Image (cartoon, rainbow, N blue to C red):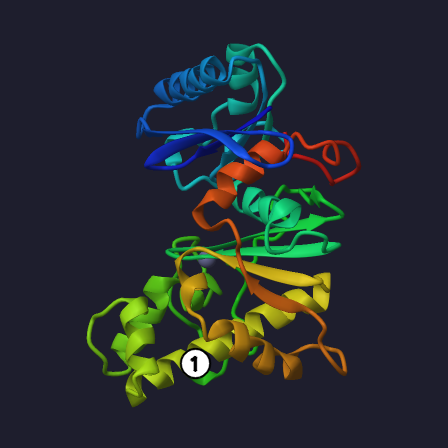
Amino acid sequence: MRIGIDLGGTKIEGIAIAPGGREIVRRRIPAPRGDYQQTLAAVAGLVREIEYEIGERATVGVGIPGTLSPATGLVKNANSTWLIGQPLGEDLPRLLERPIRFANDANCFALSEATDGAAAGAATVFGVIVGTGCGGGIVIGGRVLVGANAIAGEWGHNPLPGAHDAESPGPPCYCGRRGCIEQFLSGPALARDYHDSGGASITAKEIAALAAAGDPLAEAAMARYDDRFARALASVINVLDPDIVVLGGGMSNLDRLYTRVPQMWTPYVFSDRVATRLVRARHGDSSGVRGAAWLWEAAHGGGSGLGAGG
Ligand SMILES: [Zn+2]
């Protein structure tokens, strides 16, 4: 059995899955916000509770916001800021008395979809989570690509490629720069763009519904969004050349993306034709916690830069 833990900012989710991927147990508890020691205790308690339920000791993989720094071993880049700078990679294995694999939550998403989701069987997978933010992860040959800085796949804070006058320098981002991809592709970014073009303050979902009903202002905002998505993914395709791009997160529910973006990305890709497919995640919100469990699949671990990240 494999236990996967998704350590989120507001909730901590745990599952146990059987070797074939069947989910045996699922538990969800509120995250002790702001308190690292209580977070440790909560994760350890959740693992013990699941093991009691399944009646055996299991491997444990943990998906975290941010990543463990290869340089220091401490958590970095986490939006759950109380985890930043903490030795999670030492403390949790000691508490649970076993080795534990850690990975960024977007990497877990990509691994889940590459293992038995929408990208199963693909050699090179780019997994994208676009919702309130914009993250990404890379899986090659069934393994998470971690990278020298443990940020492989983090495309959301690159500048929007091909930004024209109206997009430059672009909105400020919490990372300190301007015009990041996240500031154009997240749900709040679409809502802001629509509002700035004269529309009401409504959600991305409502804008998409208006566009589908023929509203010209909403359709214009959606058309800008499609084109920005295409440019942003084209630059990834030029570098990684993935077989498949899997979308998760709230914005992955916009059906039009799967037809329009691949129609629009070709002029930006350095190739006569583009074989890369754009698909929606199969496991939806469960991909993070499933991918954490799959960190202990036999294919993972070892290799320079390839591995589970912890
Ligand atoms: Zn940024």
Residue 251 locus on image (x, y percent): 41, 63
Give 173 or 32, whichever is nearer the viewer: 32
Whether residue 153 sits left or right of residue 200 in the image: it is right
Query: Is 58 or 134 nearer to us in this picture?
Result: 58
Q: Is residue 161 visible?
A: no
User: Where does the N terminus fall, quadrant-wise?
Assistant: top right
Give residue 125's quadrant in the image.
bottom right
- Looking at the rendered structure, the kind of residue marked 1 is Arg
Q: Is residue 104 above or below residue 204?
A: above
- Examine the rendered structure and indicate whether residue 238 appears above or below residue 295: below
Give the percent coordinates (x, y) of residue 77: 49, 41
Left/right placement of residue 201 relative to residue 262 reads left
Q: Position of residue 127 (x, y in %)?
A: 58, 55
Secondary structure under the numbered disc 1 in the rendered image: helix
Residue at label 1?
224
Vertically, is 218 above or below 71? Answer: below
Q: Is residue 251 visible?
A: yes
- Asked if disc 1 is less than 8 Å from ligand 1, the answer is no
The residue at the point 45 percent across, 17 percent down is: 53
Q: Residues within 10 Å of mark 1 (few under 14, many from 20)?
A: some
Q: Residue 185 appears in which quarter of the rendering?
A: bottom left
